[in-house]
């Protein structure tokens, strides 16, 4: 093979089959697309001849506008031909036929190659303006994924297109094709389809349709026929409610019924079901060009009765689409759902199914947004309060523990288990990071510990601990004059990096004083100082923390008389250094200094959590997972790549959040 030939071979032989997707692999989809192609060509009838065995010839013939040789070259042979750009969404009708508005199915120029589902090449005969063009189209490798292998020209009156292929694979089942095509195209009686000579009628859909009779004023009647399309449409353009008068379509199918109702065409129900309203006695209510009905009380009555009936049917069919509707909403929020604990996941799933059941026509976007809101609410809740009650029970109080558990529901227990699981993950991450000499503690270990104040004891778990302008001013007074720097001061004014690569956090609880409710006062202040890896705590560090407590109390910025707790954490503690120290003056004790190691911090928390986890697991080990939840979480997903540049600090901090 020459270099030039290699350079031109841009497409593999099966490229087009892979590009076409289901059109090239699923017979029902392929033939549906070819019939839609005839619809777009302004045809009034289409004949399909399906062979009964492999090797036979499959043909699709329509009486549409046909194509000239030039049009075939531009439209048919352009992969991903943009119909909307070059022809618009309005269908062109053959010359001499009465034209009425028809909206095209085609968008991206894929469906026309549906015959490749059955063989590697097919024949196109198309005629218009007295000229006949015959082409043989096939797939191959080279500079084009498909080519015209032969072409002939002649003469023929009228217009139309005939497609044919020798079936070497995917032999279609005639009965199945009849059902699918009838469900998709039955909305317009003016568009006739025959399969092996058998016309498609509503009778072919009896097992896929529900019929409801409407009795209207002055002897007028209507029959509402709800048809299951058996396979969800990707587009709802030709779904909706089709009104018939004398078995002729009025206007175009739409989920908007006059000024009476506007059903959301994006719902699972709307994409799966088609509705026909076959009327009697409304001949004088149709606009002359059959583009719609006149605006009269008679038509208003018809629209209202039809809308009410469709709404009731949608409710009846809710059980058939609720699972799929719920799945769509949960899949859209799958990443956030995975971040929740098992108990919260079950609650979100139950909420989603309840909404879909109660409102089968709910907008997919609305339901997905509602699910996202519930997930955010679940994130704001946790088992922390219950866990705090457990943690405060002494290890010997078995009766108290049993009494507390007896009052819990399964969801309460799941919340605590979720909280414990999350905290055990934090402990595992801290253990690994603390033992790794290569750890960048400023951006990994320290932020992780500072976000997990429960490590220092249940009394510091409260969500009320936070930073504010008062504490920011105190922090700047303590550390701001030296080489200390605030980490992301706008977002985290409570974290400071000190010159010796230590990290400090200052948070507090501000509440209204019961004795003076007019002014909020600081009740408790927590100071945590984390030393760099390998650091041994001496008296100097403990005394320094003592000084911090005294400076905070005397800073003049703090309202009230808060109790100040300071923790100093290092890799080890020197011999003779006290691990607990009370700070105060003649009038009262206003603070405490605690010294500990990373190892002791983790071990204490681990022992406390494992005891609780074992107790809860033994009690609730037979809980099952919702089937829908399992399906949603087990489905593969495409991960979105965030290519926006970010600082190394934020990236590392984010990596730790994902790890735990």
Image: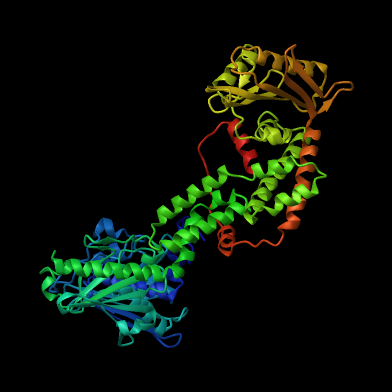
What is the quadrant of residue 215 in the picture? bottom left
Report the front residue among 505 and 615: 615
Quadrant into which the C terminus falls: top right
Report the front residue among 226 and 309: 309
- 104 on left or right of 101: right
Whether residue 167 is visible: yes
Whether residue 531 is visible: no
Report the front residue among 639 and 60: 639
Q: Position of residue 172 (x, y in %)?
A: 43, 81
Q: Position of residue 573 (x, y in %)?
A: 84, 25
Query: Measured along the vertical axis of the image, is residue 245 above or below residue 341?
Result: below
- 236 on left or right of 290: right
Q: Which coloring applies here?
A: rainbow
Image mark count: 0
Query: Measured along the vertical axis of the image, is residue 566 above or below residue 329?
Result: above
What is the quadrant of residue 314 in the picture? bottom left
Task: Identify the residue at horizontal 60%, vertical 32% (top origin).
Answer: 464
Task: Identify the residue at horizontal 36%, vertical 71% (top origin).
Answer: 313
Q: Position of residue 555 (x, y in %)?
A: 63, 12
Query: Measured along the vertical axis of the image, is residue 653 above or below residue 371?
Result: above
Report the front residue among 411 and 238: 411
Task: Identify the residue at horizontal 65%, vertical 39% (top origin).
Answer: 656
- 415 on left or right of 317: right
- 227 on left or right of 2: left
């Amino acid at each position: 093979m020459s270099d030039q030939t290699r350079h031109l071979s841009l497409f593999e032989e099966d490229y087009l089959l892979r590009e076409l997707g289901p059109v090239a692999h699923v017979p029902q989809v392929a033939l549906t697309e070819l019939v839609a192609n005839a619809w777009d060509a302004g045809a009034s009838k289409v004949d399909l001849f399906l062979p009964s065995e492999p090797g036979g010839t499959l043909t699709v013939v329509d009486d549409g506008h046909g194509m000239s040789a030039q049009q075939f070259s531009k439209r048919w042979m352009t992969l991903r031909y943009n119909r909307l750009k070059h022809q618009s969404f309005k269908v062109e009708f053959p010359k001499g036929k009465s034209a009425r508005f028809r909206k095209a199915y085609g968008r991206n120029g894929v469906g026309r190659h549906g015959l490749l589902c059955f063989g590697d090449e097919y024949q196109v005969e198309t005629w218009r303006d007295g000229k006949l063009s015959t082409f043989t189209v096939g797939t191959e490798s080279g500079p084009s994924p498909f080519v015209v292998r032969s072409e002939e020209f002649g003469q023929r009156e009228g217009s139309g297109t005939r497609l044919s292929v020798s079936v070497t694979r995917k032999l279609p089942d005639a009965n199945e094709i009849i059902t699918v095509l009838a469900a998709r195209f039955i909305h317009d009686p003016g568009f006739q389809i025959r399969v092996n000579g058998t016309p498609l009628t509503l009778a072919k859909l009896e097992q896929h349709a529900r019929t409801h009779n409407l009795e209207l004023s002055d002897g007028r009647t209507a029959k509402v026929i709800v048809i299951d399309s058996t396979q969800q449409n990707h587009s709802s353009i030709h779904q909706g409610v089709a009104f018939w008068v004398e078995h002729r379509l009025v206007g175009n199918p739409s989920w908007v019924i006059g000024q009476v109702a506007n059903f959301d065409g994006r719902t699972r129900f709307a994409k799966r079901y088609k509705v026909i309203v076959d009327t009697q006695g409304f001949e004088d209510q149709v606009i002359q060009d059959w583009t719609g009905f006149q605006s009269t009380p008679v038509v208003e009555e018809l629209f209202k009765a039809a809308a009410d009936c469709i709404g009731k049917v949608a409710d009846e069919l809710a059980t058939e689409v609720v699972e799929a509707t719920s799945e769509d909403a949960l899949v859209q929020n799958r990443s956030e759902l995975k971040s929740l604990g098992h108990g919260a996941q079950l609650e979100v799933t139950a909420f989603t199914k309840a909404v879909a059941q109660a409102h089968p026509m709910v907008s997919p976007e609305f339901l997905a947004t509602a699910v996202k809101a519930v997930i955010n609410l679940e994130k704001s809740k946790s088992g922390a309060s219950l866990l705090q009650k457990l943690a405060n029970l002494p290890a010997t109080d078995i009766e108290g523990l049993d009494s507390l558990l007896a009052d819990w529901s399964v969801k309460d227990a799941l919340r605590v288990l979720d909280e414990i699981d999350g905290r055990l993950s934090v402990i595992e991450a801290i253990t690994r990071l603390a033992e790794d000499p290569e750890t960048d503690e400023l951006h990994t270990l320290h932020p992780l510990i500072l976000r997990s104040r429960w490590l220092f004891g249940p009394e510091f778990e409260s969500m009320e601990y936070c930073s504010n302008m008062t504490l920011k001013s105190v922090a700047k007074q303590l550390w701001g004059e030296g080489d200390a720097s605030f980490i992301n001061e706008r977002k985290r004014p409570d974290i400071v990096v000190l010159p010796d690569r230590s990290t400090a956090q200052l948070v507090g609880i501000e509440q209204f004083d019961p004795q003076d409710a007019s002014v909020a006062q600081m009740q408790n202040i927590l100071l945590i100082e984390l030393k760099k890896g390998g650091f041994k705590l001496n008296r100097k560090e403990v005394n320094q923390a003592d000084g911090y407590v005294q400076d905070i109390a005397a800073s003049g910025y703090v309202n009230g008389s808060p109790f100040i707790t300071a923790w100093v954490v290092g890799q080890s503690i020197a011999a003779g250094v006290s691990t607990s120290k009370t700070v105060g003056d003649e009038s009262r004790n206003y603070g405490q200094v605690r010294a500990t190691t990373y190892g002791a911090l983790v071990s204490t928390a681990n022992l406390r959590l494992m005891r609780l986890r074992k107790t809860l697991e033994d009690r609730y080990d037979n809980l099952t997972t919702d089937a829908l939840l399992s399906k949603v979480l087990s489905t593969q997903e495409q991960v979105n790549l965030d290519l926006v540049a970010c600082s190394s600090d934020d990236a590392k901090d984010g990596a730790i959040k994902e790890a735990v």
